[in-house]
């Protein structure tokens, strides 16, 4: 056994896993959530917001296509540090472009660049995690990485939005307020790069593949895609793809409209909350509900299995959509009522989303497990892009009818859950059920 040295002690997983996965979560929440609130406060229509920010999810859809090149070019450590630096520069670019007349075009382009860097960072960081830890530590720290990823969601949607709201109030300058928020994020990422340059270990297996047969890698990648669609019966594959794309269809639409609904004045059908109140309600209370729902969903699935809980979890995602129907019809609901409804809806979504993630793991089982799971997450990101027309639809029919529409769309959630449960034989002997 090698003696423990100060160098190896500095590279304890506790010194880099929390910060690595906190840094992984912040860019995603900035691109997919903070951007929605920011554009709403800057005066964009719901149609434009949903359409533009919907396209920003594209990098996470297509990231499986370049994941092999992250594997064969340079090291995972190099990719991780480089992408963090790119994200820091992108955040600074957003900050300095907001006060300009062309801020919409420029910030969208930079958000897309940041999405590409963030998706690449996801590939590299997850690969680095597997290379830097042995099998025991990978299992031990999986809960830690998930926790700090969710903490990033809380910080991104909560304190940062609250900070923007306070600056809006004190300065009266909305672009300046959001510029300060992105300057803070940029400075944080520059510090993260410096810190991780010092603390990320250098695993001996994380080496540059100078003599890798690129043709062989590409062939293996093609085989992974081919077997993804052929390793199961056609009916089972079709049901699985329908489930991946449509199980979250109601939530894909709600995600683009909830914050505008909370921010819009009452004469336009919204609730008239301030930016700071939205940061507290959706970014803090909502994320806590989402996290608790996910934790309890995981505990339930561990005890009863995916087959037993798939349908109840689908109903959980569906029925809790009714909370926004209630809020849209309720006369002047109190802030406490709004917080409670958002908590219930996000809790139900977190509980129901557990079934979705467990099914992706189940479907990815077998040869090419890593590649197949990456493809599944690509379909997951594509499913959320289906909500990009939600803003246009809401502006045509209003908030009340839009929320009723999302409840009706829950037939896709229930229907695909029943379809995939029947077609895949989840929980039957030999089915490889994931608990």
Image: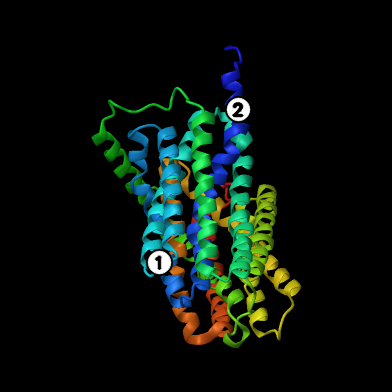
- Tell me where residue 139 sits by quadrant: top right
**Residue lying furthest front:** 171
Q: Is residue 215 above or below residue 119?
A: above
Colour style of the rendered protein structure: rainbow
Q: Nearer the viewer, residue 310 or 10?
A: 10
User: Considering only order in the chain, which callout, 2 or 1, is on the residue closer to the N terminus?
Assistant: 2
- Tell me where residue 285 sits by quadrant: bottom right
Percent from the top left, x then y, of residue 283?
Answer: 63, 61
Measuring 39% from the left and 51% from the top, which residue is drawn there? Answer: 116
Q: Bin the neighbour count of mark 2 within 10 Å (Cα to Cα): few under 14, some 14-19, many 20 and up.
A: few
Residue 100 numbered tag? 1
Residues at circles 1 and 2 in contact by the CB criterion of under 8 Å = no
Q: Is residue 129 visible?
A: no
User: Would residue 347 appear left or right of 369 to someone viewing this image?
Assistant: right
Percent from the top left, x then y, of residue 295?
Answer: 68, 51
Q: Is residue 393 visible?
A: yes
Measuring 39% from the left and 63% from the top, which residue is drawn there? Answer: 108
Percent from the top left, x then y, of residue 13?
Answer: 59, 31
Percent from the top left, x then y, of residue 55?
Answer: 39, 64
Residue 12 numbered tag? 2
Measuring 57% from the left and 50% from the top, which residue is drawn there? Answer: 428
- Tell me where residue 142 sits by quadrant: top right
């Amino acid at each position: 056994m090698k003696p423990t040295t100060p160098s190896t002690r500095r590279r304890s997983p506790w010194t880099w896993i929390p910060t690595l996965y906190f840094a992984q979560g912040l860019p995603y929440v900035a691109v997919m959530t903070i951007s929605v609130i920011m554009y709403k406060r800057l005066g964009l229509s719901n149609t434009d917001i949903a359409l533009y920010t919907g396209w920003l999810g594209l990098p996470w859809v297509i990231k499986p296509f370049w994941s092999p090149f992250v594997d064969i070019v340079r090291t995972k450590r190099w990719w991780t540090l480089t992408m963090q630096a790119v994200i820091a520069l992108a955040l600074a670019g957003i900050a300095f472009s907001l006060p300009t007349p062309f801020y919409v075009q420029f910030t969208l382009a930079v958000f897309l660049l940041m999405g590409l860097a963030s998706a690449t960072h996801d590939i590299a960081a997850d690969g680095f995690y597997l290379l830097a830890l042995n099998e025991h530590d990978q299992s031990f720290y999986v809960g830690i990485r998930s926790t700090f990823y969710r903490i990033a969601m809380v910080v991104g949607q909560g304190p940062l939005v609250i900070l923007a709201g306070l600056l809006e109030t004190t300065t009266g300058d909305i672009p300046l307020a959001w510029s300060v928020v992105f300057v803070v994020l940029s400075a944080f990422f520059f510090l993260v790069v410096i810190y991780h340059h010092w603390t990320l270990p250098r695993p001996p297996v994380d080496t540059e593949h100078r003599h890798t047969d690129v043709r062989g890698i590409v062939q293996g990648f093609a085989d992974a895609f081919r077997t993804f669609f052929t390793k199961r019966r056609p009916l089972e594959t079709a049901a699985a793809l329908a489930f991946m794309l449509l199980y979250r269809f109601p939530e894909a639409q709600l995600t683009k409209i909830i914050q505008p609904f909370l921010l819009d004045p009452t004469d336009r059908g919204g609730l008239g909350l301030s930016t700071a109140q939205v940061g507290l309600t959706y970014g803090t209370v909502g994320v806590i509900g989402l996290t608790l729902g996910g934790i309890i969903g995981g505990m339930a699935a561990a005890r009863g299995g995916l087959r037993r809980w798939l349908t109840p979890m689908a109903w959980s995602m569906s029925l809790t959509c009714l909370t926004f129907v209630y809020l849209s019809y309720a006369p002047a609901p109190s802030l406490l009522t709004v917080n409670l409804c958002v908590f219930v809806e996000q809790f139900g979504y977190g509980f129901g989303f557990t079934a979705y993630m467990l099914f992706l793991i189940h479907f990815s089982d077998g040869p090419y497990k890593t590649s197949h799971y990456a493809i599944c997450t690509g379909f997951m990101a594509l499913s959320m892009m289906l909500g990009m027309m939600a803003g246009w639809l809401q502006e045509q029919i209003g908030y009340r009818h839009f929320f009723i529409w999302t409840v009706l769309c829950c037939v896709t959630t229930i229907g695909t859950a029943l379809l995939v449960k029947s077609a895949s034989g989840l929980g039957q002997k030999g089915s490889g059920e994931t608990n």
